[in-house]
């Protein structure tokens, strides 16, 4: 099925903070300034930036994090389009796509318990790109909570995303996204 690394598994992701996180990345601000803006610690700001990378909204460069075209498109879109871009990005994230494949469907993945997702992560996630050791069970449990929230977001928001009206606005294939709706 493939191997995940902990850096590909979300942690402490709050979708309500995506906008401000991406704005800080676009402006080249530090994680310290982001932490202050979101009223969280620097560790949480680090995780929010990592989640933006997992979603394909940002990449690491020699000068720090920079927005991708998808990240810029997300920031420049209206709320309706943001929902579609976010849904597509969650579906395309390595951990969610692997979990859906493992479960057989988005609906089955949504029915998985946090313990089931934790077990999946322990079996399929390495601690880092430099180590062959699996993710620690306690870390997997915390990350499973975030993965479960991402899947629940998809299930809960899928009926409210106006897919048909937004199809002409997106320039990437969304066949996989539409297959789940």
Image (tube, rainbow, N blue to C red):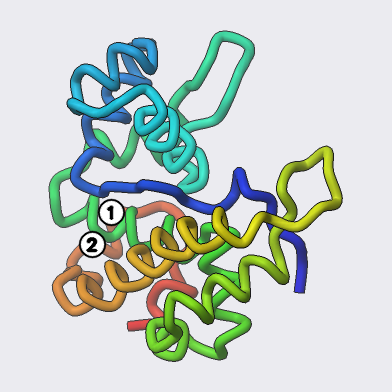
Q: Which residue is mark 2?
A: 166
136 left or right, relative to 178: right
Number of residue marks: 2
Write the residue at 54% across / 30% down.
Answer: 59
Write the residue at 30% across / 29% down.
Answer: 21
On screen, residue 96 above or below 81 = below
> Residue 105 at x, y = what percent?
49, 88
Quarter of the view holding residue 80 = bottom left
Q: Nearer the viewer, residue 154 or 46?
A: 46
Question: Tag 2: Cα neighbours inside 10 Å, few (<14), some, or many (≥20)?
Answer: some
Q: Secondary structure at mark 2?
A: helix
Tell me the distance, in whole angstroms, between the alpha carbons under discs 1 and 2.
Answer: 5 Å
> Residue 166 at x, y = what percent?
23, 62
Question: Tag 1: Cα neighbours inside 10 Å, few (<14), some, or many (≥20)?
Answer: few
Q: Do callouts 1 and 2 mark residues in contact (Cβ within 8 Å)?
A: yes
> Residue 7 at x, y = what percent?
61, 43
On screen, residue 20 above or below 157 = above
Write the residue at 56% across / 9% down.
Answer: 63
> Residue 110 at x, y = what percent?
39, 82
Q: Nearer the viewer, residue 20 or 158?
A: 20
113 left or right, relative to 138: left
Write the residue at 49% across / 78% down.
Answer: 115
Quarter of the view holding residue 120 = bottom right
Q: Is residue 69 visible?
A: no
On screen, residue 30 above or below 88 = above
Q: Secondary structure at mark 1?
A: helix
| Label number found at residue 142 | none
Q: Is residue 45 visible?
A: yes
Quarter of the view holding residue 89 = bottom left
| Label number found at residue 169 | 1
In which quadrant will I find the N terminus? bottom right
In which quadrant will I find the C terminus? bottom left
């Amino acid at each position: 099925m493939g191997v995940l690394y902990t850096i590909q598994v979300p942690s402490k992701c709050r979708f309500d903070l995506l906008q401000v996180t991406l704005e800080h990345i676009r402006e080249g601000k530090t994680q310290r300034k982001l932490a202050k803006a979101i009223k969280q610690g620097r560790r949480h700001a680090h995780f929010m930036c990592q989640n933006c990378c997992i979603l394909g909204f940002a990449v690491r460069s020699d000068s720090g994090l920079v927005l991708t075209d998808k990240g810029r498109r997300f920031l420049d879109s209206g709320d309706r389009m943001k929902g579609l871009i976010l849904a597509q990005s969650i579906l395309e994230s390595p951990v969610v796509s692997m979990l859906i494949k493992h479960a057989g469907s988005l609906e089955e993945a949504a029915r998985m318990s946090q313990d089931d997702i934790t077990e999946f992560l322990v079996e399929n996630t390495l601690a880092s790109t430099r180590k062959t050791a699996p993710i620690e069970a306690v870390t997997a449990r915390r990350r499973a909570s975030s993965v479960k929230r991402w899947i629940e977001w998809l299930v809960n928001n899928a009926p409210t995303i106006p897919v048909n009206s937004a199809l002409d606005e997106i320039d990437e294939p969304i066949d996989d996204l539409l297959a789940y709706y």
